[in-house]
Image (cartoon, coloured by chain):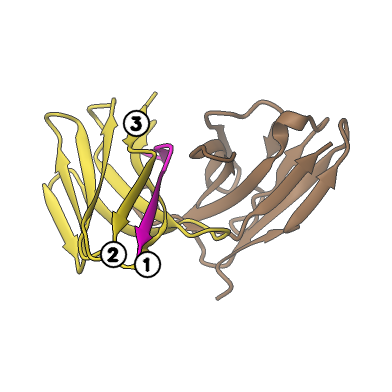
């Protein structure tokens, strides 16, 4: 099993550009999450999903969108990138709310 | 929503000494408390978790205690080793238990 995979690993965007961060898991987990991690800060939840077709906002959803058309994939869309979105983005999945979250390797995004 | 506070933000200990990290939470309905370890440049990984029906849980050199009345829980690492150096995050479930809220993290340095 590959676990949770994310692409790309690194990306530099210009202000106003858009991009999609890809996340795929092969563990048949229903729950999936997107976090951002800023230096010296904890993990802030952006969006999460408890199953295909179901998504909900986390703590910091502004400037992002998600979709969940399959169990395996949970892409995160950034529209009109801003410098405040410079961060490391982690995708995670779990087999339920009381179970371990498995994290992907992260995407380091810089917006200039 | 849930608020998780974690302290200290940094902790330095001599190899072989014990380390203690403390967290408090605000939602009295929270009943799942995981701890994650993140090594430099790596993804967070679960090291131990506890549910509210127990007060303490141990796994080799790591233990977690929970005081539901006071709404705080702690991570104890005994006989620390250099490979314990990392950032440790506490978390508590929230929002209908479909997600967790993370603390800000504690950077632990074990000095050989």
- For the residue labelled by badge 3, is the local secondary structure a helix, a strand or a loop? strand
- In the image, taking residue B16 as reference, residue A29 lies left or right, namely right
Task: Provide the residue span drawn in magenta.
Answer: B97-112
Q: CA distance from mark 3 to mark 1?
A: 26 Å
Q: Find out whether the residues at labels 2 and 1 contact each other: C-beta distance under 8 Å.
A: yes
Which chain letter matches label 1? B
Mark 3 or 1, which is nearer the eye? 1
Residue at mark 3 shares a chain with residue at mark 1: yes
Residue at mark 2 shares a chain with residue at mark 1: yes
Identity of the residue drawn at 58% across and 51% down: A91
Q: Nearer the viewer, residue B33 or A76?
A: B33
Tell me if residue A67 can be seen.
Answer: no
Quarter of the image for residue A61 reads top right
Q: CA distance from mark 2 to mark 3?
A: 26 Å
Q: Is residue B104 magenta?
A: yes
Q: Which residue is mark 2?
A: B15
Q: Which mark is residue B5?
A: 3
**Which chain is displayed in brown in the rendered image?**
A
Q: Position of residue A102 (x, y in %)?
A: 48, 59
- In the image, taking residue A81 as reference, residue A47 lies left or right, namely left
Which chain letter matches label 2? B
Q: Which residue is mark 1?
A: B82
Q: Nearer the viewer, residue B110 or B41?
A: B110
Quarter of the image for residue A86 reads top right
Q: Position of residue A108 (x, y in %)?
A: 70, 50
- For the residue labelled by badge 1, is the local secondary structure a helix, a strand or a loop? helix
Q: Quadrant of the N terminus of chain B?
A: top left
């Amino acid at each position: 099993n590959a676990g949770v995979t994310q692409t790309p690993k690194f990306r530099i965007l210009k202000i106003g550009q858009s991009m999609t961060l890809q996340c795929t898991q092969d563990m048949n987990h229903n729950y999936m999450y997107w976090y951002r991690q800023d230096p010296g800060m904890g993990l802030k939840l952006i969006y999460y999903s408890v199953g295909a077709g179901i998504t909900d906002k986390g703590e910091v959803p502004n400037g992002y969108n998600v979709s969940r058309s399959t169990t395996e994939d949970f892409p995160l869309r950034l529209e009109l990138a801003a410098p405040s979105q410079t961060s490391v983005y982690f995708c995670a999945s779990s087999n339920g709310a009381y179970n371990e979250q498995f994290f992907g390797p992260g995407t380091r995004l810089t917006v200039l | 929503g849930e608020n998780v506070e974690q302290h200290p933000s940094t902790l330095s200990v001599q190899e072989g000494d014990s380390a203690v990290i403390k967290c408090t939470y605000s939602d009295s309905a929270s009943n799942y408390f995981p701890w994650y370890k993140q090594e430099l440049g790596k993804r967070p990984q679960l090291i131990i978790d506890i549910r509210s029906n127990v007060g303490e849980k141990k796994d080799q050199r790591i233990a977690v205690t929970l005081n539901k009345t006071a709404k705080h829980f702690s991570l104890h690492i005994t006989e620390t080793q250099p490979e314990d150096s990392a950032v440790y995050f506490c978390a508590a479930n929230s929002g209908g238990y479909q997600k967790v809220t993370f603390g800000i993290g504690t950077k632990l340095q074990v000095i050989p």
